[in-house]
Image (cartoon, rainbow, N blue to C red):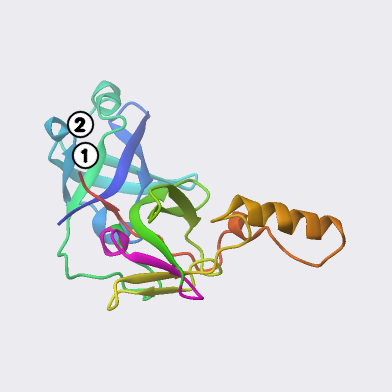
């Protein structure tokens, strides 16, 4: 199975080095020197990593055969794709690969059917589960523990505890009115991050 593990950014310096947007929780394994990666577009690869280092919080890579800035710039926005055993799972039990999450049924903690996960969107501030609803619409669910308390791969199910307004805008309006009246109700859960949300590798094209 092919998984997207990075996206090439800007050239750095004049010797072919590039910045890389990491899309894997295991960069030390997937993006290590010597790794051979397929690419999207396919014509840009395969690429073999020659060197890697961290600079100002960003991963910098240099690929074999790319020795100048022009060659590095030509790779900008190229996706890096690793071949991964589909039975392999992340070491952290709270982390999941995208392909494990896609097509899971989504239900609320009280058993209400919501839909099915169609996509995992990796944004700079958090990951979102794109859920295709049973009524034909879509909803974006922040992938944090307080909103997605359970992922059951055996049952192929994701359990969510949606804050007011996530699934029904009318609920958000009612919650807002209660808050204005002084009720101690926190409706900001959907904007939170860092409470155990699990980021996995992206599915390859």
Decide which of 189, 9 is in the foreground and name it: 189
| Residue 24 visible | no
Would you say residue 194 is visible in this rendering? yes
**In this picture, residue 156 sits left or right of residue 162:** left
Residue furthest to the right in view is 182
* Residue to which mark 1 is pinned: 63
Look at the numbered disc 1 and give the secondary structure of its residue.
strand
Depth check: 188 or 62 in front? Answer: 188
Local SS, label 2 = loop
Q: Is residue 86 left or right of residue 115?
A: left
Q: Residue at x 50, y 74 (%)?
A: 109
Front residue (pair 90, 27): 90
Q: Residues within 10 Å of mark 1 (few under 14, many from 20)?
A: many
User: Viewer-proximal residue, 118 or 14?
Assistant: 118
Which quadrant would residue 11 be assigned to in this image? top left
* Figure disc tally: 2
Q: What residue do we see at 46% from left, 46% from top? A: 123
Task: List x then y, in percent, for residue 127.
Answer: 45, 54
Q: Which mark is residue 66?
A: 2
Marks 1 and 2, how far apart at CA: 6 Å
Name the quadrant of the N terminus: bottom left
Q: Which residue range is magenta in the image?
A: 99-111
Q: Is residue 130 part of the magenta span, yes or no?
A: no
Q: Are marks 1 and 2 in contact (CB under 8 Å)?
A: yes
């Amino acid at each position: 199975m092919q998984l997207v593990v990075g996206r090439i950014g800007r050239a750095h310096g004049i010797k072919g080095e590039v910045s890389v947007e990491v899309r894997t929780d295991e960069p030390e394994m997937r993006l290590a020197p010597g790794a051979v990666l397929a690419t999207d577009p396919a014509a840009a690869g395969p690429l073999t990593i020659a060197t890697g280092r961290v600079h100002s919080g960003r991963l910098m890579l240099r690929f074999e055969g790319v020795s100048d800035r022009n060659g590095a710039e030509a790779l900008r926005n190229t996706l890096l794709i690793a071949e991964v055993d589909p039975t392999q799972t992340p070491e952290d039990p709270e982390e999941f690969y995208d392909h494990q999450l896609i097509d899971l049924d989504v239900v609320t903690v009280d058993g209400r059917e919501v839909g099915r996960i169609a996509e995992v969107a990796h944004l700079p501030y958090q990951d979102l589960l794109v859920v295709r609803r049973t009524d034909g619409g879509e909803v974006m669910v922040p992938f944090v523990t307080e909103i997605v308390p359970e992922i059951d791969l055996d049952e192929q199910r994701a359990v969510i505890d949606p804050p007011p307004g996530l699934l029904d805008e009318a609920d958000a309006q009612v919650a807002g009115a209660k808050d204005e009246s002084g009720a101690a109700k926190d409706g900001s859960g959907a904007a939170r991050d860092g409470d155990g949300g699990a980021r996995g590798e992206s599915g390859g094209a």
